[in-house]
């Protein structure tokens, strides 16, 4: 038997192996300012109908398709079918004006100690998914859900302080 030359994993004491991606977030042109807060969960914006628009050169464009599918995100939400697959945790806080968009950094893998988990903040080992409030996470309701990550240190309910090991569920 040979010697192990590489051990793959998501995190360790000396190497956090955090992985980040850049993506756009937006505020619908018919709404108001939207604040995206560090620690909130994001999902890809894939809705191609309705009122999810940005303004480009004075005309409304679908937020999901302007940069191409998979390049625009919204706050993850388990109650909105198109936004319930969370892919990462926002790494900064930004406020976006109606009709505008902004590039942000999102953590998809590694340890994150600023995740906002609703009500039952989860016990160690619990899988987490998009929550019932936009941007929040919750403990996974069933094994049918692709987990965003796993709780490694419990936090306070509805506060940005739960430590989660993000599992990069979409392999970004």
Image: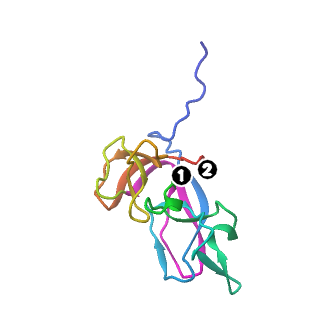
Image quadrant for the N terminus?
top right
Q: Nearer the viewer, residue 19 or 117?
A: 117
- Residue plotted at (59% across, 29% down): 6
Where in the figure is residue 79, as x and y percent of width and height? 43, 62
Residue on which disc 1 sits: 108
Secondary structure at badge 2 equals loop
Q: Is residue 100 magenta?
A: yes
Do labels 2 and 1 touch, CB within 8 Å? yes
In the picture, measured across the screen, residue 160 lies left or right of residue 105, that is: left
Residue 74 visible, this angle: yes
- Which of the two labelled residues, at mark 2 and mark 1, occupies the earlier sequence position? 1
* 134 over 56 or under it: above or below: above
Q: Residue furthest bottom?
A: 58
- Residue plotted at (51% across, 54% down): 85
The quadrant where residue 48 appears? bottom right
Q: Nearer the viewer, residue 4 or 124?
A: 124
Q: Which residues are magenta?
A: 87-116
Where in the figure is residue 52, as x and y percent of width and height? 58, 74
Residue on which disc 2 sits: 172
Q: Which mark is residue 48?
A: none
Where in the figure is residue 65, as x and y percent of width and height? 68, 68
Residue 90 visible, this angle: no
Q: Is residue 9 magenta?
A: no
- Residue plotted at (30% across, 45% down): 123
Q: Residue furthest top?
A: 1
């Amino acid at each position: 038997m040979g010697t192990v030359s590489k051990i793959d994993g998501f995190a360790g004491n000396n190497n956090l192996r955090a992985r980040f991606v850049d993506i756009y977030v937006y505020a619908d042109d018919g709404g108001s300012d939207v604040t995206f807060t560090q620690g909130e969960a994001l999902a890809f914006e894939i809705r191609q109908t309705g009122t999810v628009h940005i303004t480009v050169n004075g005309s409304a464009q679908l937020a999901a398709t302007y940069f191409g599918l998979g390049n625009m995100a919204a706050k993850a939400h388990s109650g909105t079918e198109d936004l319930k697959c969370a892919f990462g945790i926002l790494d900064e806080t930004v406020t976006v004006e109606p009709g505008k968009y902004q590039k942000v950094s999102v953590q998809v893998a590694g340890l994150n100690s600023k995740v906002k988990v609703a009500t039952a903040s989860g016990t160690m080992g619990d899988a987490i998914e998009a929550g019932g409030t936009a941007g929040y996470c919750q403990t996974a309701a069933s094994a049918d859900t692709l987990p965003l990550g796993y709780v490694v240190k419990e936090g306070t309910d509805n506060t940005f302080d739960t430590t989660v090991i993000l599992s990069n569920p979409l392999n970004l």
